[in-house]
Amino acid sequence: MTEGPAGLPTPIALTIAGSDSSGGAGIQADLKTFSAFGVYGASVITALTAQNTCGVQGVEVVSAPFVAAQLNSVLTDLDVAAIKTGMLANAEIVTAVARVLAASPGRPLVVDPVMVATSGDTLLAADAVDAVRTSLLPLATLVTPNLPEAAILLRVNRAQSEQDMIGQAEALRALAGCHAVLVKGGHATGEAALDILASPAGIERFARPRLATPHSHGTGCSLSAAIAALLAQGAGLGEAVDRAKTYVWEGLRHGQGLCIGKGRGPIDHLFRIRGAGPPA
């Protein structure tokens, strides 16, 4: 941690992910989320996307050695208190990131196994799924797959019920050897948006009323970034998940009035700041 204005440590969180040129997801969403929680954000960029609220028009992947170089630069200078990963693009990047992180343990790692964008565009090469499963997940404090991602990682059908979600969360935790798994139910139906956390403490449920809004761009990135920010501040895992879910729910609620883009707009990451007004 660095020293803040009053001499107090400033928590630092690091995101390793792709850039979203429209600002709603990826690195941009993560840094906005870190800022919303008062955490200093650093970043390692794995890919550039030509992307907007309507879809992904193009991707330029950063070389794996340069991704590792960025990561080493940050970790050899900044006292990073928590890390999250998002879009890692291909197996070479996954392996390079896992190698550096394995050599520098001792901090919470939140793995968001980003495979498909909200628009439906593919963001992870097929051969990278095995690399995520075998190299990255075992290092994770928390893995945050949505329903399709959990099914792909486990090579099973998508969960259709709460009991299915519990079973898949426990199965993925056992398969990957990670500390905890949060299976997100945003892709399900019903009045409540339910997430299931499987950890050494057992099974925990996190539910909020489902919001009927198309403007959900960046929800997965923002949830994992919020959890990482809270872990960097010293919150326990259950508390971090609960508070992060509330933050994203409020972002979805406020995001309905942002009117950004012609497609699936972003959540409002800065609803608290917007409510307080701009700096003097």
Image (cartoon, rainbow, N blue to C red):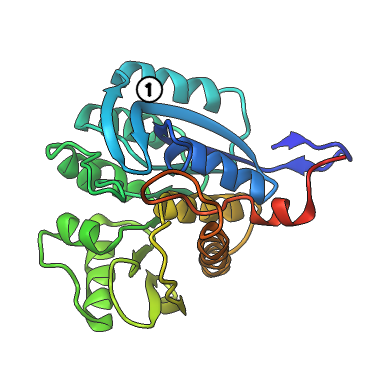
Quadrant where the C terminus sits is top right
Q: Would residue 187 be visible to someone looking at this image?
A: yes
In the depicted view, which residue is nearer to us: 233 or 162? 162
x%, y% of residue 12?
A: 63, 39
In the depicted view, which residue is nearer to us: 263 or 243? 263
Name the residue: 32% across, 17% down.
65
Name the residue: 29% across, 76% down.
189
Reading the image, the residue beneath label 1 is 67
| Amino acid on which disc 1 is placed | Val
Q: Would residue 141 be visible to someone looking at this image?
A: no
x%, y% of residue 187?
A: 29, 66
x%, y% of residue 216?
A: 41, 57
x%, y% of residue 92?
A: 23, 27
**Is residue 233 placed above or below 261 in the rendered structure?**
below
Callout 1 crowding tier (Cα within 10 Å): few <14, some 14–19, many ≥20: many
Name the residue: 28% across, 72% down.
188
